[in-house]
Amino acid sequence: MEKKIICILVSMLMCATVFSVTGTKQLNVENEEVITNAIETSFCSMYQDWLHYDDGTCENALGLTAGGVLHEVIKLTPDELGSYPNHWFTNIKVMHGWPSGTPQPAHDYVVWMFTGTNHPTDPMTEATIVATGTCDPVNDWVEVDIDDYDFSPTDTVWVGVGWTHNAGEFPCGFDTGTSVPEKSGWLCYGGTTWNQLHLIGYPGAWNLWVQVEPANLPPLTPDAPDGPDNGITDVEYPFEATTTDPEGDPIEYWFEWGDGENSGWVSPGIAQHAWTTAGTFEVTVKARDSWGGESDFSPAHLITIVAGPVLEIQTIRGGLFRVKTIVKNVGATTATNVDYTISLDGGTWINLESTGTIPSIPAGEGKEIKSKLLIGFGEFYVTVTATVPEMSDTRTQHGKMLFIYAKVNPGGG
């Protein structure tokens, strides 16, 4: 969608007795913007427009006779902003001095914005400060990255740059041929005194440009994450969330588990968590797009966790005709109907797999399990798995069969 750069022609009020002005020779600025280029591309691949009232040239500059703070201000109305729904201001460009005028030293500046039909009485106390800084000692355009400032197409927004300067300095550049009264040349000095350029004998427009870009919309708030309603301690449970982004930006997700822990940012929206204590926990999730826009947290998914058995297979040991180990329950409740498998990869000629069920293992206790008869020669890997509903543990170790003796190396897991 094409946008036209709006060259806004405006003028405003000011008292001639408080200003000194440089010469009147007209000069095209060396780095003048090509204003026929209607759309420029920003760093985030969104189009950006510059709204301004001047013609891109700087033909004069103003400063306060005794020095102080001079605010150059333009007024943007629904006439200028009406075609920019869901946009914000992101940068300003302003001419510091006049390229043909008195060399300007470095000056402190403050950039502010104010939304309202009438200008603020005192911009330094009523407006929103969107940037501060010190420009280099140059007579040239200064571009400033500001805090993003939201506006509505029906708003009237005042944009000002306040320059702190000494007597005999002229920080505020303007053109002399594009005056738009009530819009292009407002100025404020002495804290609360307002005037306009065309009313003090300088019809023209401030060399002040404001950049607009589409505002990034955050992802829609996800629904409550999908996952189980019940579980036991120390068992990981998966949760999943999905949402969409209005601009189709990539999305990542952040899960809060209700116990002080979180998933960090993950993509896609799938994460697992194990609770170490019993209780009912609220699982929520939010989404973030690739520009950093975050949604609100979702409604909560409740999960009730009870203390449960936790199986832990101890070191596998060898011996005559068999390998064996202990399945220990390190959880808080009795483990019942514990299924186990002992399997060998290589080594034995018979009974490569042995299975069984342990009726129960009380909390804090262990039960020994053994393989069936083993006979053979050669190296093997032995793997033991013990399982109860919703959890299991597995351990693997290396060993060697010496006919009827199984030698298992320590370690593994």
Image: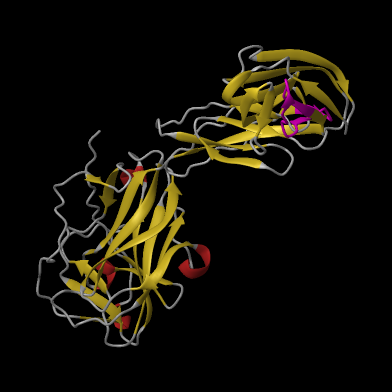
Task: Give residue 27's position: percent from left, percent from top.
Answer: 10, 69
In the rendered view, tell whether residue 321 sits above or below residue 172. above
Quarter of the image where the N terminus is located: top left
Residue 299 vs 48, above or below: the answer is above
- Camera-nearest residue between 29 and 319: 319
Colour mode of the rendering? secondary structure
Q: How many marks?
A: 0
Residue found at the very far front of the displayed protein:
403
Q: Quadrant of residue 311?
A: top right
Report x, y in % for residue 364. 88, 34
Q: In this view of the protein, which residue sits in the foreground, 178 or 168?
A: 168
Residue 339 part of the magenta segment: no
Q: Quadrant of the C terminus?
A: top right
Q: Quadrant of residue 199?
A: bottom left
Q: Closest to the observer: 45 or 167?
A: 45
Magenta-tinted stretch: 303-326
Left or right: 271, with 108 as reference point:
right
309 inside magenta stretch: yes
In this rendering, would 97 be left or right of 213?
A: left
Please report the residue visible at 54 percent of the width from the left and 40 percent of the height from the top. 265
Q: In x, y percent, where is residue 17?
A: 30, 82
How far across and down, in percent of the image, does residue 18 sit?
32, 82
